[in-house]
Amino acid sequence: MGKKLKKKKRKHSRGYYIFTMAFKITFLITLMIGLIGGVWFYFAYGKDILQLQKEAKILVRESSVDTFRQTETSLVYGANGKLLMSMKGEKDSYYIAYEDIPDEAKQAMIAIEDKNFTIHHGVDWKGVMRAAWMLVKHRGQVTQGASTITQQLSRNIFLTHEVSWERKIKEMFIAFELEKKYSKAQILEFYLNNIYFANGYYGIQAASKGYFNVTVDKLSLSQIAFLCAIPNNPTLYDPIDHLENTLKRRDRILYQMKTDKWIVQEIYEDAIAETIELDVKSVSKKNYVATYIIYCATRALMSQNGFEFKNEFSSEDEKAAYETSYSDMYTQCQQSLYSGGYRIYTSIDMTKQKKLQNAVNEELKSFDEKSEDGIYKLQGAAVSIENKTGRVVAIVGGRNQKSVGYTLNRGFQSFRQPGSSIKPLVVYTPAFELGYTPNSKVKDEKLKDGPKNSDNTYLGVIPIRTAVAKSKNTIAWKLFEEITPKAGLAYVLKMNFAKIQESDYGLASALGGLTIGASPVEMASGYAALENDGVYREPTCIVKITDAQGYEIVPEQITKKRIYEKNASRMMVSCMNTVMTSGTGAGIKLSNMTCAGKTGTTNDKKDGWFVGFTRYYTTSVWVGYDIPQTLSDLQGASYPGRIWKAYMEWLHEDLEDKPFEEYEDTKDEKNEVQPTEEEIDYKEEDMHLEFSEEPEEEAPEEEWSEEGDEPIEEPLSTDGVEGYGGDVVDEPEWDEDENEENMEEEPDEAQEDGQDDVTENSETSEEDSGADTEPQDGEVVE
């Protein structure tokens, strides 16, 4: 009993010792890697992060309640340096205190935007983890979302909308500091007075007055939830343009409020059942210059903030993700235009703008039929580009109507089938790159399974120059078949044509039979590239953007991209010069200046185009109905051509005539025939059309800045605006004779009537509006 029991020592197996040793070694290796990684992270990012934290502390420390009440007006200047318009949001005069904001508005915003607002300290770490997962999922691409109310306030007041990890980290630091300095009530007050509710309304009081014409304390729960639906995406949930979208999000907010116990079932059901009736006060509608400036300035800020524009996608999911990202960034950057105090310098010349607008108005003045909304049914659009810079100097989005404000700017927002005005861009210039020349022999003949010529005549073997001048569909069709639709359309995709569809990869596109079509600004920029020896400049009216102190936000720089070979472009210009001297454009040739151009008319004469240029300027003109219908005498050289001539004659009155650069003669690889002054008697039995079996390898595209010759890489950009017009062209109709008078068969005979080829047209159902001449905030001062 007195003996102490000896504790029996437990023996461990060999496997246990091996496992223990392996664990210790693994732990030490992991610790070492962690330490090394920590040291590396500190030297790679630590100093930057500490600097961001320091800057955040300074920003918040220097802020006050007044910081969240201020708004800076942005100013826009024209080409002559004079003020065109000012842009500011309605915030300061509608600021309301926390106790005056309805509880339902506070609850609705917390329920839909930031459920943990009352308990977090500026950042919701669950949201951060979700954002981190999305970062991995999208292979390093930073996406929007998961920001708390405090983070959104930080971004809107203190930061730009740049997409980068640095901005996100700084946003988090600012949110932390805001939560230290201000109460939750103050932060929610700042937020509800600063968020954007579309149409220039900042803050819930301004939105209440703007959409319901009452103060916010007079609103019902349903109306409050309706307003709170807008800020998440003011473009998508704009109640004027997308009422159904706003209503759907209102219902979602009410459901979340019920789920979070803010409201009971009975109140929820009553709010859902309530009919929303807007009482919109007079909204200042922007004229054509203003809408285009806002669009270009917004995209310039997006680009400067790191957004990459795209117009080609590998899948529908990729396209949908891009469109969401585009819409979010566009909305954020557009908002900043109304409060950022920018100085926006543009290339818009109001003298040219008025002349182009008058040319459209005068040519179409006899067509006075209007829609139910009081809008002229027959419309026109035109865009003028200065060839030296590639910038837009004038843009007309429709006919001028004093009694109606503008909405749709057809100059860049409408996409219509371009008819044969597309041929130089996707058929003939690419063919010249393959070895054809303006004098190559081609056979104009009836095609069994192809299009007919618009004049129903066939000339046999002719030079390509004559085929272009007389707009021969058969030749364009056969050349496009050799080039292939994929190769031909690649050229316009590189020039950022935004609406090329999968269904466009067929031969009908050779004649402009595109599913949706092209916009006047796209066509003008494409032709300007041909005049510029094949070098493309993205069309914009923005010269530069600075802040109020003059610091450059968007620098003055022209980015260039080679699309076509120089000699091929000069060959195309030479052929289009022949269009004006002895082809479909002979009747609208300028009297005082060497010019080139191409007509375009779609099937049933629903769309008419003329795009032409001199060494100085390129101008495109479209005429047609918003809801497509036949205009019996519509041709490329009729209404569109006469608008072009009236404007371009005036534009070049005091300018010295400049002939186009001549192309270099090349080896006779494609059955060349030299034209003579006399009509050439072509013998069909002695000549035949030859096509090369394999196209030459495409030269790599180059981009460079105006400031140097070194190539630079830049992603393709696209017009992210909504499509307008266009049904799918399943099978083009070729059997209808569109012309009342046949063109002469002689290749050098002047064509006064401007007859052109035809293609299948598209349908659309969008309405639009005209113009308001009273300059208001956000409108151009003429």
Image (tube, grey):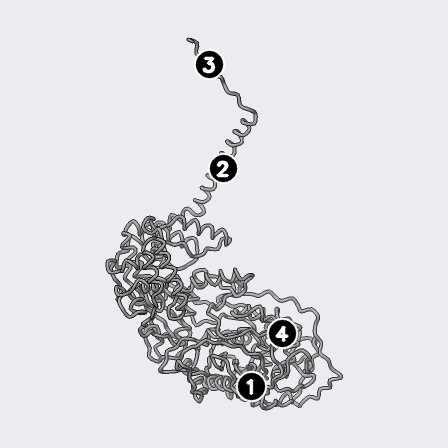
The kind of residue tagged 2 is: Thr
The answer to whether 104 is drawn above or below residue 529 in the figure is above
Label 1 environment density (alpha carbons within 10 Å; few <14, some 14–19, many ≥20): many
**Position of residue 416 measured from the top left corner of the image (x, y, whole percent):** 51, 76
Is mark 1 in CB contact (under 8 Å) with mark 3? Answer: no
Residue that label 1 marks: 585
Is mark 1 in CB contact (under 8 Å) with mark 2? Answer: no
Q: State how far apart marks 2 and 3 are (Cα).
A: 40 Å
**Position of residue 642 measured from the top left corner of the image (x, y, whole percent):** 49, 87
Element marked by disc 2 = helix
Q: Which quarter of the rendered picture does the N terminus lie within?
A: top left
Q: Nearer the viewer, mark 4 or mark 2?
A: 4
Is mark 4 in CB contact (under 8 Å) with mark 2? Answer: no
Foreground pick, 363 / 107: 107
Element marked by disc 4 = helix
Q: Nearer the viewer, mark 1 or mark 2?
A: 2
The answer to whether 310 is drawn above or below residue 770 in the figure is above
Is mark 4 in CB contact (under 8 Å) with mark 1? Answer: no
The kind of residue tagged 4 is: Leu
**Position of residue 581 measured from the top left corner of the image (x, y, whole percent):** 58, 87
Residue that label 3 marks: 6
Q: Nearer the viewer, mark 4 or mark 1?
A: 4
Q: State how far apart marks 3 and 4 are (Cα).
A: 98 Å
Whether residue 11 sits left or right of residue 211 in the image: it is right
Whether residue 222 sits left or right of residue 719 in the image: it is left
Q: Pick whichever of labels 1 and 3 is earlier in the sequence.
A: 3
Q: Pick whichever of labels 4 and 1 is earlier in the sequence.
A: 4
Q: State how far apart marks 4 and 1 are (Cα).
A: 25 Å
Q: Which residue is drawn at 46% across and 84% down?
A: 647
Q: Pick whichever of labels 4 and 2 is earlier in the sequence.
A: 2
